[in-house]
Image (cartoon, rainbow, N blue to C red):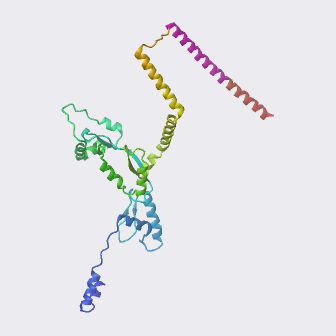
Amino acid sequence: MIRSFGAFGTGTGGSAFGQYLTQPQQQVPPSPLEALHNAALNCSVYEDERDTTLARWNLLQALWATGKAYYSQMALPVQLTQQNPLCRFKAIGYSCMPSSDNAQGLVAITFYRKEIEIRSQQAQLISGSMRRILATDLSACLLMQKHQLLSLGADSVFAQVAPDKDQIKEYLENPPAGIDPRLWKQAQLDNPNPEKYNSVPVTAFGEVKAGLPLQPEEEALRSQFDALQNQLHAPLFKGQVSELLSQMRMQRQEAAHGEFERYSMDPSVQEYIKQFLVMKQKGMVRLTDTIQTDLATLKIIKEGITRLLQER
């Protein structure tokens, strides 16, 4: 078809027209964000009403962060991951920043096996000559033996090194992929202790679901902390603490000038008190048994009266 158009005329116009048709213009592939928006809002695979259903399905997959989104016959499908901005299973949490120095040589190793299996394969401690190396050098050395680490059940190694101020600033200024910058900024403002904790994204359904059972416990602990804080700031409690501090100072002064009076109890008196407490405990047990027996008897009487009333 294209060659037949090129055969019209022998002038430059016909040749140029045929050459234009034989060289179609290359389309620039869209960016991942643009492709995602096209898959969810501007789907054009069938060019009919089926595209509306496909767009809704693509949107549902994007919300769940799984699958592939098809939106055009001329473009590759979009691989939906947890980092896409439409993923609904995401939150912001706080993680304790490492405080160790690089010279201490501390590393963190994550395992995908159970602790019992790891303990059974634990090697004997080295008793020869040892020396301390940097944590970054140790992690780099362990990562070079990646296949051996996988066979032992370890999947990743991290150097436990406290980040400097520039690293923290750069991390906080750049929101992670798929996280709204406004949400990331608000999480930094809500950080309870910026010197100790750092904001971390929590994505995927499994990670978000793992945090749900911990919320009641967190709320209970927060309520206890608030109650303790209110108690510590109460005027009556402050007065009691001041009184105890005054008594401690007086006792220290008395101890510096002389000895305290000491008292001791005769062993026979101790035995008498012990026997008295034992008798009291036995009496309480006997009284409890009597109460339980009376309650059972009252229950039988009540059932008998109910039965008689029903027979009448």
**Left or right: 1 with respect to 240?**
left
Judge whether residue 65 can be spotted in this image: no
Position in image of residue 182 (x %, y %): 42, 57
Position in image of residue 252 (x %, y %): 42, 20
- Residue at 71% x, 26% y: name it: 298
**Left or right: 207 with respect to 312?**
left
Whether residue 273 is in magenta: the answer is yes
- Vertical arrangement, residue 166 with respect to residue 76, above or below: above
Of 95 and 166, nearer the camera is 166
Of 202 and 46, nearer the camera is 202
Position in image of residue 289 (x %, y %): 63, 21
Q: Quadrant of the C terminus?
A: top right
Position in image of residue 54 (x %, y %): 45, 67
- Residue at 43% x, 19% y: name it: 253
Quarter assignment of residue 142: top left
- Residue at 70% x, 25% y: name it: 297
Q: Residue furthest right?
A: 312
